[in-house]
Amino acid sequence: MTQIRAAEAGDVGALAEIQVAAGAAFRTVGLGWIADNPVPTDEQYLGYVRDGRAFVLADGAVPVGFVLVDLVDGAAHVEQLSVAPSHARRGLGARLIDHVDGWAAARRLPALTLCTFRDVPWNAPYYARLGFVEIGTPGPGLAALLRAEAAFGLDPATRVAMRRPVRPA
Ligand SMILES: CC(C)(COP(=O)(O)OP(=O)(O)OC[C@H]1O[C@@H](n2cnc3c(N)ncnc32)[C@H](O)[C@@H]1OP(=O)(O)O)[C@@H](O)C(=O)NCCC(=O)NCCS
């Protein structure tokens, strides 16, 4: 049985493994360099754990997916969402997004946001099916994130910022 819980310090190794395994899918769409990109350091993952902004989806005791959340422009920003290929396409990513929705609602945040690839099937088209819409004019925090991505080498034309209102309780 799968359940979502707050991530713990002992999960950090599993988070890195899941992110590497999930990221391998980018090789199939000509984005191998994204797959090869280093995942966050243990200390970076731990920052989210300590702040209560990392959630793990566990199958029994085994983490198989996770989400990291930032606060950007007053919204819950999905910084990273990864589901292990062994557990992909079972709706677990959508469940993690809905968990963030509940987290945001409890903090009276108005929306979820994220930055993603416009044309990768499991990125913007997937999020659009989950109810996210493109943000026409990103706020200052999101605009800064998009600028940082571009400086890192991501072609801005391939990227999109999206938003989904937090659902009423
Ligand atoms: C995005 C991700 C978290 C989705 O997790 P998931 O548990 O598989 O999500 P769901 O089961 O809720 O939905 C998966 C949907 O993504 C799309 N998708 C996933 N893999 C796909 C693939 N290889 N080709 C085409 N579409 C794909 C499909 O629309 C799929 O729905 P379907 O199975 O009903 O067709 C997972 O694919 C992942 O970890 N990807 C790599 C990391 C990543 O891109 N993270 C998001 C960065 S913004």
Image (tube, grey):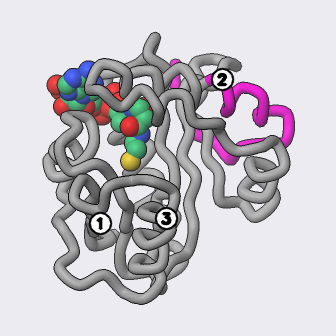
Marks 3/2 in contact by CB < 8 Å: the verdict is no
Question: Considering only order in the chain, which callout, 2 or 3, is on the residue closer to the N terminus?
Answer: 2
Q: Are marks 1 and 2 in contact (CB under 8 Å)?
A: no
Instruction: Give the position of the C terminus as an image quadrant.
Output: bottom left
For marks 3 and 2, give the CA distance. 26 Å
Residue found 44% across the figure and 44% down from its top: 96
Residue 154 inside the magenta-drawn segment: no
Residue matched to label 1:
161
User: What residue is shown at x 37% (from left), y 21% (from top)?
Assistant: 27
From the viewer's perspective, is residue 116 above or below residue 103? above
Disc 1 residue: CB within 8 Å of ligand 1: no
Question: Which of the 4 image quadrants contains residue 64?
Answer: top right
Rendered view: 143 above or below 82: below
On the image, the x and y values in percent for residue 20 come to 58, 25
Q: Which residues are magenta?
A: 1-17
Q: Is 7 rendered above or below residue 142?
A: above
Q: Is mark 3 within 8 Å of ligand 1?
A: no
For the residue pair 3 and 64, the one nearer the viewer reads as 64
Going 65% across and 36% down the picture, which residue do you hit?
38
Residue 27 is at least partly visible in this image = yes
Where disc 3 sits, the SS reads helix
Identified at 72% across, 57% down, the residue is 48
**Is the residue 31 above or below the residue 1 in the image?**
below
Name the residue type under label 1. Answer: Ala
> Which residue is labeled 3 in the image?
151
Q: Secondary structure at mark 1?
A: strand
Q: Which residue is mark 2?
A: 17
Residue type at mark 2? Glu
Checking the image for residue 104, the label placed there is none
